Image: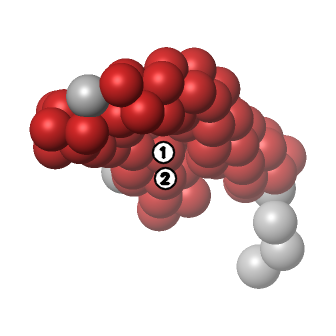
Amino acid sequence: MGLTTIDAYLAIAASISIAGGLIGTGMAQQGIGAAGMGIIAEKPEKFGQVLFFFIIPETLWIIGVAFGIILLLGIL
């Protein structure tokens, strides 16, 4: 029971999905983190709001990993 070409394509698709989610998260948090530090420096009471906006992009990698697992398990 060797691997087929379809299995290889699914593995590549899953890795692209996971990597895309991680790269997207990093790019989003880069701008939010820089802006958030400026806001916190001026108004420390806004820390909770900035933290909330910093955490929102984390859903990108969660979705990427979930989709990658779905592809690898062949659920689609």
Q: Nearer the viewer, mark 1 or mark 2?
A: 1
In the picture, which quadrant includes the N terminus? bottom right
Kindly identify which residue carries mark 2: 65
Do the numbered discs 1 and 2 sit on residues whose CB atoms are within 8 Å?
Answer: yes
Q: Which mark is residue 61?
A: 1
Residue 12 x/y as whole percent: 78, 44
Return the residue nearer the eye: 63 or 76: 63
- Label 1: few (<14), some or many (≥20) within 10 Å? many
User: On the picture, is 14 further left or further right than 63?
Assistant: right
Residue 56 visible at all: no
Residue 56 x/y as whole percent: 29, 35
Return the residue nearer the eye: 4 or 33: 33
Residue 40 x/y as whole percent: 35, 34
Residue 19 x/y as whole percent: 70, 43
Q: Quadrant of residue 47?
A: top left
In the picture, which quadrant includes the C terminus? top left
In this view, the residue farthest toward the bottom is: 1
User: On the picture, is 46 further left or further right than 51?
Assistant: left
The residue depicted at 56 percent of the width and 58 percent of the height is: 72
